Amino acid sequence: MFGFEGDNAREKGIVLLTMCFALAMAMLDNTVVNVALPSISRALGAGFSELQWIVDAYVLAFASLLLTGGILGDRYGRKRMFLIGLTIFTVFSLFCGLASSPTQLIVSRALQGVGGALLIPGTLSIITVTFPPHERAKALGLWAGVSGIALALGPTLGGWMVEHLGWESVFFLNVPIGITAFFVAMSTVRESRSEHERKLDVVGLVLGTSALFFVTYGLIEGNALGWTSPRIVASLTLFAILLGSFLWWELRYEHAMMPLRFFKIPAFSAGNTVAFAISMGMFATFFFLTIYMQEIHGYSPFQAGAAFLPMTLAIIITAPNAGKYASKHGSRGPMTYGLCLAGGGLLLLGLLLTPTTSYWPMVPLFIAMGHGMGATMAPMTAAVMNSVGRERAGLGSAMTNTSREVGGVLGIALLGAILSSQIRSAFAPKIAALGLSATQIQTVAAGAKSGDLNLAGLSPEQASGVKAAFDSAFMQGFRPALLFAGTVLLVAALVANRFIPGRDTIAHHHATADVGEAGEPVVAH
């Protein structure tokens, strides 16, 4: 199977397929939910802030526990943690589909994220210990290929399912996949543990997770409660205190889950900054582009998902070639080039999009942005891996993934704050001149908060005026959000160009950094 060697070639092939299916399940869940958001809003009466939590609850739990998930697998058994993560993910996928309120869905999504954080590191480590070195690259290539296919198919498949089977189907799909993967893994995957026992950093986990929760809460709920609300002020104050405490602890604890000493290495710091920025800018933008396409343009879920195909296909085509280029010429060039393309695309979208912009002018921008992301991601990972050396490659990869997930959490919260504040301030004055009664204004304003306008009882002229007012208010918030996201990526391009190794430093004797026997970064000269 797949051309692997040895008497257990079939068993290895089945293990690889099982890991790939589990990975695809988690990856698909991350991409299909965005397309389902407007349908979820209408079905459960969820407002903009609750839609943000539906996405961020998953990513917040996933980002917080990703580093810990790998350590738990190394310490207590990779197969055991994989099966536990798979079980949690599958069970709460079922609960997500059965949710009858936004709160139930948000809680289930958070627990889904816990399962994902145990599941994803397990897929990679199980493949690593199952395959001998000469077959490992091929297995990991197939594993990464499945990730790319899931990324490409996610929005389109999710859109078709939402349109024909309901929003619940994007969660129910995980249940048969998860059950099958569980029983196959039980019988084929061999248990393994790390030879070197890694200690858990419980204090760091609690401090870091709490800090991330409070800043996310403050940014998402600030518009609804008011930025001077005692709850929001307390939330942001707690974030500052907890972040300071987390950094203090991680600098001093011998077994820190996020060893901050690695940030002394310029390429490592720059690579993680880029990972954070590209998630904050690009992936958070997808969240709001989906709402724009469905609520402003009236696209069906399937049409909205298919609209992203040019971008995702550009990523898949570009990424492998960018990785090969970076291995020969260094990561600086493709990262700088890619971030400029992606950031420039967001700036142009922010300048050009209107409520009546057709899809076709977006296509070249989507292709350019996808090409830019593809040119950035593989070289970014390579730069981080090279900066910490082979012995700490797993930790470097986990920290980069964490930076990316945290960027996504804060991007959705921050861009959502920009969008919501503009809608809040612009919509009310626009409908005041339409001659609506106080009750009608209250009903319409409540619908605007969820992006689902209630136009019942309005005359055709009033309904048309309210829709135009909402579209205008939405764009008044969406444009600055896009411009902010584009600026973040252009700043990241400057960071990459300044600190990422280029053609002149790619040779082994000019490597940016390595890690000594004691685990401290040693900067090469």
Image (cartoon, helix red, strand yellow):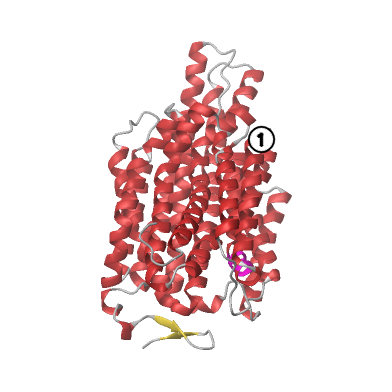
Q: Residue at x 62, y 36 (%)?
A: 97
Q: How many marks?
A: 1
Q: Could you tell me residue 143's position as x and y percent?
A: 43, 58
Secondary structure of the residue carrying tag 1 is: helix
Confirm whether residue 436 shows in the render.
yes
Q: Amino acid at mark 1?
A: Leu
The residue shown at (58%, 38%) is 172
Which residue has dot 1 on it?
98
Q: For residue 293, which quarter of the picture?
A: top left
The image quarter containing residue 385 is bottom left
Residue 42 in the image, given as x and y percentages of width and height: 59, 28
Quarter of the figure that contains the C terminus: bottom left
Q: Residue furthest top?
A: 459
Residue 113 lies in the magenta stretch: no
Pick whichever, 75 or 1, lies toward us.
Answer: 1
Residue ID at (52%, 15%): 462
Q: Who is closer to the viewer here, 479 or 100?
A: 100
Q: Does residue 218 appear anywhere in the picture?
A: no
Magenta stretch in the rendered image: 67-73
- Dominant SS type (magenta): helix
Identify the image quadrant of residue 95. top right
The quarter of the rendered structure image containing the N terminus is: bottom left
- Image side of residue 168 versus residue 299, left or right: right
- Left or right of 321? Residue 441 is right
Is residue 206 placed above or below 196 in the rendered structure?
above
Q: Is residue 401 above or below residue 432?
A: below
x then y, percent, for residue 338: 32, 58
Identify which residue is drawn at 44% across, 52% down.
281
**Few, some or many C-alpha atoms within 10 Å of disc 1 (few <14, some 14-19, many ≥20)?**
some
- Image location of residue 209, percent across then percent down: 65, 61
Say whether residue 69 is magenta: yes
